[in-house]
Amino acid sequence: GAGVSQTPSNKVTEKGKYVELRCDPISGHTALYWYRQSLGQGPEFLIYFQGTGAADDSGLPNDRFFAVRPEGSVSTLKIQRTERGDSAVYLCASSSLLQETQYFGPGTRLLVL
Amino acid sequence: QKEVEQNSGPLSVPEGAIASLNCTYSDRGSQSFFWYRQYSGKSPELIMSIYSNGDKEDGRFTAQLNKASQYVSLLIRDSQPSDSATYLCAVNRRGHSGAGSYQLTFGKGTKLSVIP
């Protein structure tokens, strides 16, 4: 079956611009997670949705980062006033209600010039 | 203090040998433990999960957990060149009951090279 999909696969933007990253989870998965992975590091948790609501946003680094999941399926991670330090791979994962395994999408590689 | 620590490597083993990857964690409340494999430029892929002390085997992979020592390891038997990747250890406070945080905390990963 179809896995987690993310678009775009690559995004190059200029410092100060606004970007949106999209995640389409595995069909039927109620839980959705965003992580950020910098070069040479493990993924770092950003935010977790259960259904439409953000159940845990403790990993968002500051108020420039925001994420939504209005219909409980697709999620969008929004970054305002991008900075060069935001350059990383943004990973989305999903899991079912009864299973803990998180399945990762291919990621979006964000480069802020 | 880092919450999940791994030796970054690289760890080089000859083809056919056993590769041993180690991970320690600081949060004694951790309930679930995972090993992910990540090929260069790709996303993490789950290899093993373990929840109870002891060993868990799946094919060529064995995960070992010792909660008293806060230590989890992954053994890869009969290592193949295709096993060359970065292996990420991840922990979660959430138990089987569903209580606790859902976020995974990852180590930096250990880069494994299997030499033909």
Image: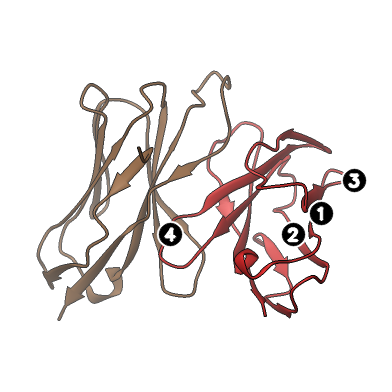
The answer for how far apart the CA atoms under marks 1 and 2 are is 6 Å
Residue at the disc numbered 4? A41
Q: Is residue A107 in view?
A: no
Residue B11 visible in image: yes
Q: Answer with left or right where residue B91 lies relative to residue B13.
A: right
Pointer 4 and pointer 3: residues touching (CB < 8 Å)? no
State which tag comes first along the sequence, 4 or 3. Answer: 4
Q: What chain letter is assigned to the residue under label 2?
A: A
- Supply the letter of whichever chain is brown: B
Q: Are marks 1 and 4 in contact (CB under 8 Å)?
A: no
For the residues labelled 4 and 3, the Cα–Cα distance comes to 31 Å
- Taking the spot 27% from the left edge, 52% from the top edge, the residue there is B59
Q: CA distance from mark 3 to mark 2?
A: 12 Å
Label 1 and label 4 in one chain = yes
Q: Which mark is residue A70?
A: 3
Q: Quadrant of residue B65?
A: top left
Find disc 1 in the rendering and name its residue: A74
Looking at the image, which residue sits at the far right?
A70
Q: Residue at x 66, y 33 (%)?
A: A97
Do the residues under discs 3 and 2 have CB atoms within 8 angstroms? no
Query: B6 left or right of A86?
Result: left
Disc 2 target residue: A23
Task: Say what amino acid the circle numbered 4 marks.
Answer: Gln
